[in-house]
Image (cartoon, rainbow, N blue to C red):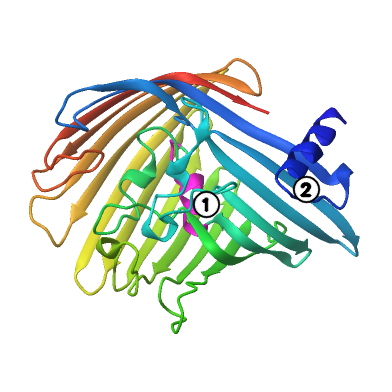
Amino acid sequence: MKKTLLAISLLSAFGVASAQSSSVTIYGTLDAGISSTHGADSAGTITSVGSGQESYSRLGFKGSEDLGSGMKALFVLEQGIALNNGMLDLSVANTNPYDFGNYGVFNSQAYVGLSSNVGTLKFGRQFSPLYEAYESIDPFHNGFAANINNFFGTNAENFSNYQRMSNAVIYSTPDNLSGLTGSVAYGFGGVPGSTAAQSQVGASLAYSNGGLTVAYAYHQANNEQEMLVPEFSTDLFKTNFIGAAYDFGPIRLHAAFDQNEQGNTFKTQDYLVGLTVPFGANQVFAGYTHKSNKLIADADADQYAVGYTYSLSKRTGLYAAYTYVKNQKESEINTNEEGNSVGTIQVGIKHSF
């Protein structure tokens, strides 16, 4: 009851009304620690308090209303938080050119929708099907300096993954299809005189049964009439992703591949293999990722990473991770200097509520 009353008060402060107080929940994740990176900047090693290292820090509100006959109305409002300075986490808004300037309240997710026994339809700013597919396969679960988004789904400017879609309509299948799930998404560009400019299309299909998970995802982004930030303009960006993971019991193995195309020329391919080893309250995970650049010579890159988490409780855990990226002389993943090798150490604590 206290959580419900607090959620209503906070929603009112943001000018949001809730039809049924009993359906509203406040939730979040607070993740902070120390990060030390060498090679990202020519000035030297950068050491600071990092926020959202294992998984991004955020405050969220969610709720649903039973409409009868198996149908529900639902909503989510979610804002990233930078715990190192108490400000909004702008990193969730600038992962790609489509989000440039999206620094407002609830820039992580903000949607409303309907769900029933035939699936869920949501309208607003949401995670893309591609991002959800990554999370199901990546041994680092889209977290740490080693997360899959460093390499997979990047365009020519090395902007990654199209994690979130604004102006989006997403349909997701119900969960009762014998392990099969899927989603399709469309993001309206909103450019006067053009339905194609800055629009996005996404889709995913996954199968999970027993210890096996297989996921495929596609994302297409058209930014041909980008005017605010011309250097981000692309004719058409497309990525195809496929990955699988299998849990053998004492160990879980991960593998993934993608191909990225921009216009008619830019093409990269990415490969990932990894493993997860849980034992008691402990979990060790590791991964190797390779980027093959088919357009630019000497622009390949490799990433080696290992991480560890220890659960103090169901909601609180400690973590440590090390990531090393080796760039060829024309590559600059995780760095401002072409050819730099980059090493990052992260330690911290995460609490969810």
Q: Which residue is mark 2?
A: 63
Q: Residue at x 48, y 53 (%)?
A: 102
Secondary structure under tag 1 reads helix
Image quadrant where one finds the C terminus: top right
Residue 109, labelled with which disc? none
Residue 285 figure quarter: top left
Residue 82 percent across, percent down from the top left:
49, 32
Q: Is residue 84 left or right of residue 159?
A: right
User: Could you say which is closer to the camera, residue 130 or residue 26?
Assistant: 26
Q: Which residue is mark 1?
A: 132
Q: Which residues are magenta?
A: 128-140
Residue 341 percent across, percent down from the top left:
16, 33
From where the camera sits, is residue 153 visible?
yes
Image quadrant where one finds the N terminus: top right
Figure check: 143 above or below 115: above
What crowding class fits label 2: few (fewer than 14 Cα within 10 Å), some (14-19), or many (20 or more)? Answer: many
| First-in-chain label (1 vs 2) | 2
User: Could you say which is closer to the camera, residue 337 or residue 347?
Assistant: 337
Secondary structure under tag 2 reads strand
- State how far apart marks 1 and 2 are (Cα): 21 Å
Q: Residue at x 77, y 44 (%)?
A: 12
> Could you tell me the amino acid type at mark 1?
Glu
